[in-house]
Image (spheres, helix red, strand yellow):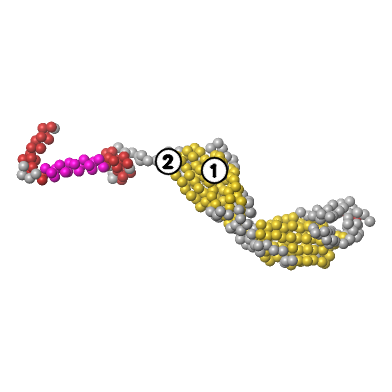
Amino acid sequence: MHKKIIHWWHGRRERFYRQNRWHLVLDISLVVLTILLTGVALRLAFYNPQIMSALGFNHYLNIDKPVDSNLSLKVDTNIGQLFVNNDEAITLEINYFNDGDVKINQVIIKPDFNSAAFKLESLTLDDFNDSQSIEGKTLILKNIEVGASGQLLLTVNWSALKEDFPRSIDWHLKVEYVGDQREASKDLVLPSVKIASDFNLKANIYFHSPQGDQLGIGPLPPIVGIPTTYWLIVKAKNSGNDLKDFVFSANLAPGVELSGEESLLAGKYSYNKEQRRLIWQIDSLEASGGDYIANFGIDFTPASNQVGKNALILTNLQYHLLDTWTNAEVLGSLDNLDSSLPADHLNRGSGVVEAE
């Protein structure tokens, strides 16, 4: 082999190099270029084996698989609530899946509100294990193996810092994870959650008003066979969103009749004699609130079988309305009202029926 190379060298020198030195320069340049290209190919093979695979050089370089690993975490979220009441917690469902090819050592998950009008108060986690924890206002997951998945129910407690806060919560989820001595992160936009209006309804029976004025007429405590007139006062309070189609209704108990006196600051009323049902209706309640009050005079004539008892005055108190912002129907009920007058500070407990 050595003699062949020497013979080849002498042959080229006699034919080319003695006649023109440029042939020698050209051959030397080609050898140097070949060495350089071979070095570049080897560096590419170790830096990014996929390139050599695409060029079909795996067979010569003996490369079977990529050197780099894939750090990846798939995260999906779901919120079952389209709206919440003010300060009502939000339940956030988090589904995760390690779809990479390395173990994830730690995941840090934190909800974050877009508006400074809201404050994240605390997080709680249902059915957690040793690899899951809450640290401050952050959810921590540890040791997620390749192909492992899980589902979490995260309760997000929040509060509004301003009275005129936006009527929807816009927020996102920050996710940071570490594995194979590398870090990755993602920012997930969460569905907006609307905030329901603050609505409150109260209904009470009075003989004297909260200010001490006498409203009722007749004996107190009530006496069998003698009418006692009370006043039913119903107050609807609203703040937050516009409401509409408000309806309050209640049944008059035996021995109870409308006196024919009423005072309405809003809406209209009707009475179904067959069902003995009183109905108060308001077409709309403004977001800023207002005086939504209805007063009704009620005559109660006790019977002998009610002696020694607090007699029922109104039963089956129901209400419903529509929140125009959340498009949600609000339904509710109130406790039955009797002659014990629990809201009447001057006559509370003076409702036990006495004999003639």
- Return the x and y of residue 237 as percentages of the image width and height: 70, 59
- Of 173 and 257, nearer the camera is 173
In the rendered image of this protein, does residue 71 appear above or below residue 312?
above
- Of 255 and 295, nearer the camera is 295
Instruction: Name the residue at 49% across, 46% down.
Output: 175
Callout 2 amino acid: Arg
**Left or right: where 9 falls relative to 278:** left
Q: Is disc 1 placed on a helix, strand or loop? A: strand
Q: Residues within 10 Å of mark 1 (few under 14, many from 20)?
A: some
**Left or right: where 92 falls relative to 283:** left
Residue 31 part of the magenta-drawn span = yes
Main secondary structure found in the magenta portion: helix
**Left or right: where 75 falls relative to 344:** left
Q: Is disc 2 placed on a helix, strand or loop? A: strand
Instruction: Name the residue at 76% across, 66% down.
Output: 264
Residue 139 marker: 1
Residue at numbered disc 2: 182
- Please, which residue is most extreme toward the top here? 2
**Which corner quadrant of the image does residue 66 belong to?**
top left
Which quadrant does the C terminus fall into? Answer: bottom right
Residue 93 marker: none
Callout 1 amino acid: Leu
Please state the extent of the stretch shown in magenta in the rendering: 24-40
- Of 221 and 209, nearer the camera is 209
- Return the x and y of residue 351 as percentages of the image width and height: 86, 54
Residue 37 part of the magenta-drawn span = yes
Q: Is residue 230 visible?
A: no
Which quadrant does the N terminus fall into? Answer: top left
